[in-house]
Image (cartoon, rainbow, N blue to C red):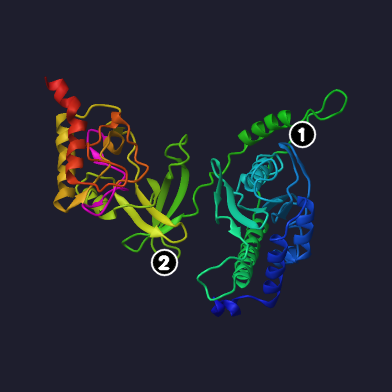
Amino acid sequence: MRDEQHEFTRADIITARSCVDACVAFYHDEDQRIKDLKHTGLERAVHPLQRTFLTSISHLLSSGRIAPDGSLSASAENSSDNALFCIVEVENEIGKGACDPIAKAEQCYKTFFCSDEARPYYQVSCCPCLLVAIAGPNIMVSGAVVGDHIISQPLTDYITLIPKLTSDPLSPHSAAVRRMARLIRALRETLAELEGFYTSLKLAPSTPLPEPLTKGGRSRGSKQRSQNRRDATSVQAQVYIGPHFTAFTDKGGARVELKYTGRMSPDECRKAVFTAVASTGTAEAGGAQSEPVAVVVKFAHTYSDVAHSLLADHSLAPKLWFCEKVPSVGMYVIVMDHLKDRQDAADRTMTATEHAALGNAVKLLHDQDLVFGDLRGPNVLLSDDGPVLIDFEWCGEEGVVCYPEDINMEDAIGWHPDVFPGGKIKKEHDLHMLDVLGSEIKEQSR
């Protein structure tokens, strides 16, 4: 820990020490806590020019009024309207106030970026924003974006500034100061990057939204303006805001660019599976590009490219373009052919020929000591060309890979009796599920 000394500026250490002292103190009300935190120099430390990190500014919007305890904003290159890139909410202590401060920050974000005023920003970007919650001596940071849904995700747990014993060779107070100094530095660097993102945006020309008036000349309010917003946006097609992963180099050294077109399952936002078109060119600048190809881009925490490639070589899985764990994503990114106009085995009964081909796919895996694990109808796509398997997230070496702890254990699925959350996946489990998928064929043949 002491080797970190050179990483912090004198100003950061002094501000961090003052923040720790202010945060651990007891206050009768939230306003006094905010006032003392402002006196520590925290606003200047996280943003040297725009010192409103702990200053409440009211925003009257078409979607409602918000007045967070602090915020930072920036405007695009061709706009005078600002977008929030940081929202701060403070509670005097954990459990005080109407709700958790991070939830309050999320509601402020939702109200701001669902407004008419923010429309030019969410038409061309994902509207990234840091949400900072301070509850007594605890600080938490989340991130929020707008895609096809509003997404908010914690970036830290609550970071306590209460001095406590640790295994580090530092006093409890020194360790708390270091924690705060790290947070100050991270906030400053991230907020500078977010501000640069917004100031470099070029907003698309938008249709003016007339303020509807009553006969007396007064505004009808946000309900009618929201209808005008829908009418205006229907005239101008919006850009689909997809994942930031938009290019990769394939095994042949060619650069492949992705243009996202939507979600594979629009109603299931928890599934990170997207449709896209892939354009392939040479790795050298200016290389010619091929005709776009429809692909599926999947993001997963685990994936077996070995198993997928094995079956793809036998036309029993979609062609695999890319499968790697990408550091900037923190997950595996899998790009494969989009096999359109296929039914899955949950929607229709397989023929005996299709079931035999599926059995061959399972045998190919088992011969390499690989197990599939999730051999259910939705993961088997059917067509006149034969069945293909998709979703190799559970797949891997027998005796090593395990079922996820959140596996759906409904009786209707028909898992092998030995299957349980966290248990090892076995070949006999695959064979059992293969029989389950073929049970309707046997019923028809009787």
How far apart, in angstroms, are the residues tagged by discs 1 and 2?
49 Å
Left/right placement of residue 291 relative to residue 155 reads left
| Placement of 8 over or under 153, stated as above or below | below
Q: Which residue is mark 2?
A: 284
Q: Residue drawn 28% across and 49% down?
A: 402
Q: Position of residue 63 (x, y in %)?
A: 71, 36
Any mark on residue 53, and which? none
Left/right placement of residue 105 relative to residue 50 reads left
**From this viewpoint, which residue is outermost toward the top?**
446
Reply yes or no: does residue 394 show up in magenta. Answer: yes
Q: Which residue is mark 1?
A: 210
Q: Residues within 10 Å of mark 1 (few under 14, many from 20)?
A: few
**Residue 61 falls in image quadrant:** top right
Q: Earlier in the sequence, mark 1 or mark 2?
A: 1
Position of the C terminus, as image quadrant, is top left
Type of residue at label 1? Pro
Position of the N terminus, as image quadrant, is bottom right
| Placement of 339 over or under 137, stated as above or below | above
Of the pair 104 and 205, the residue shown nearer to us: 104
> Can residue 440 be seen by looking at this rendering?
yes
Q: Nearer the viewer, mark 1 or mark 2?
A: 1
Helix, strand or loop under label 1: loop
Type of residue at label 2? Glu
Query: Majority secondary structure of the magenta segment?
Result: loop
| Placement of 39 over or under 428, stated as above or below | below
* Magenta residues, start to end: 382-402
Q: Position of residue 38 (x, y in %)?
A: 77, 61
| Placement of 44 over or under 418, stated as above or below | below
